[in-house]
Amino acid sequence: MRAYRGTILHCLDDPGEQSNPSAWEHFDDGLLIVDEGKIARVGEADALLADAGDDVDVVDYRGKLIVPGFIDCHVHFSQLDIIGSFGAQLLDWLNQYAFPEEAKFADAGHAREVAKVFVEELLRNGTTTALVFGTVHAHSADAIFEAAEAKSMRLIAGKVLMDTHCPAELRDDPESAYADSKALIEKWHGRGRLGYAITPRFALTSSAGQLAAAGRLAAEYPDVWVHTHLAENMEEVEEIARLYPDSRSYLDVYDGFELLRKRSVFAHCLHMDAVDRSTMAAKHGAAAFCPTSNLFLGSGLFDLPRMREAGIHCGLGTDVGGGTSLSLLRTASEAYKVLHLQEHALPAMRALYLATLGAAEALDLDDCIGNFAAGKEADFVVLDYEGSALTARRMAAAETIEEKLFALMTLADDRNVAATYILGRLSD
Ligand code: GUN
Ligand code: ZN
């Protein structure tokens, strides 16, 4: 058994806008005991050390902060090299930047090279699990799964389905989309820590026939994820309304094709009404809140309080390359600003929840990751308050754990990630 000594913090529930202290647990001098890759115990160091005897080997992270590994609920590995592309909103951005970049993934070697770097970047930022878009090419899914498997990461991904409103070289068709996705499910879903997501890009780039095929596949494999974009940009929403005049809303289009169910994860969800929110909650769909992307692409402001009040599970997503950082700390900082613009607060503890346990709930993985409950997988991050000169100075002026975490989420980046552990093993 191995134990990690340091300040330990994890969420037990959603702390909400009032930062409810019973929703999180904090040990200033804490100990996290790991046995065979799983959490054995967490608590005060003195008490646990007195109990544990000589058979634990203690790694000393005193002065640092240990939190559960971050979970990215929505990201595109193929867009790593177009982060920060200037000047366009969603539909133009797709045509100008995303589609040409994704066309490069016709080359399987390129897909493998980017997947490897992408996974390394996730880990460097403290992200231990992600829900990932591939490209239309089936081998893009192979590439990201192989890269995650090499690091023993828990990761969900899928080949993108797109057969209309996009360049010819990026199109599949309903039959090949169904057959390729099915073969990938059989190959990867449930292999080690990997899971498959049926991934129609969005209702604009999948024909009705293809959305129907995706719905049939989802019905055949109820424990596979469904991953798509929803109601991100007003022009997109208007286009969907023109294409589907009989649907009540954008969400209703997906629902009509049986794509709204448990383990359906929708990125963005910016332009929804109360009926959509209650339908999404009732059918157990989840939302990925992608603040850096929503600001960068000028898409809109995610209404976290209303989504949570409706009972929808929400987690943070980086949405790279529309998003501007793979760091969930940077993402949490932008989430704070998005809520502030709507006259709401995002306390640091709630932000931590959205990046850990809340995200695990959104992905329906909270039985195995998201906090330090005994028996969960030991994926965790060691944060260094002194990762940069500025964070070191700022921490000297912070007193409570909430102040320190808030200053970290406002200022920190990958320099403040001292170590990332996967199943209790230090990732290199
Ligand atoms: N909607 C459809 N495709 C995409 C994408 O690649 N990025 C974002 N942000 N939104 C999308
Ligand atoms: Zn996206």
Image (cartoon, rainbow, N blue to C red):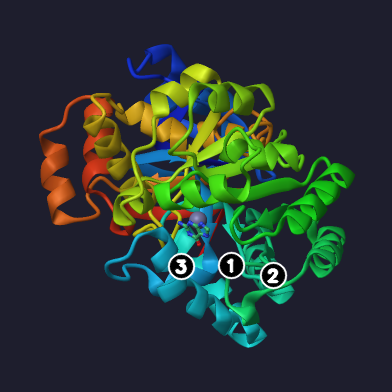
SS for dot 3: helix
Where 229 sits versus 35, above or below? below
**Rendered image quadrant of residue 365:** top right
Q: Position of residue 82 (x, y in %)?
A: 40, 73
Label 3: few (<14), some or many (≥20) within 10 Å?
A: some
Choose the circle earlier in sequence order: 2 or 3: 3
Picture residue at 66% right of the left edge, 41% below the top: 253
Choose the circle earlier in sequence order: 2 or 1: 2
Where 348 sits versus 238, above or below? above
Query: How far, Cα to Cα, is label 2 from label 1?
Result: 30 Å
Q: Amino acid at mark 3?
A: Leu
Residue 349 falls left or right of residue 308 = left
Residue 270 falls left or right of residue 52 = left
Q: Amino acid at mark 2?
A: Glu
Numbered tag placed on residue 146 in the rendering: 2
Q: Quadrant of the N terminus?
A: top right
**Is there any visible trace of residue 31 in the rendered image?**
yes
Is ligand 1 closer than 8 angstroms to the Cβ of mark 3? yes
SS for dot 2: helix
Instruction: Look at mark 1 in the image and give the residue it sits on.
Output: 165
SS for dot 1: loop
Instruction: Look at mark 3 in the image and give the residue it sits on.
Output: 94
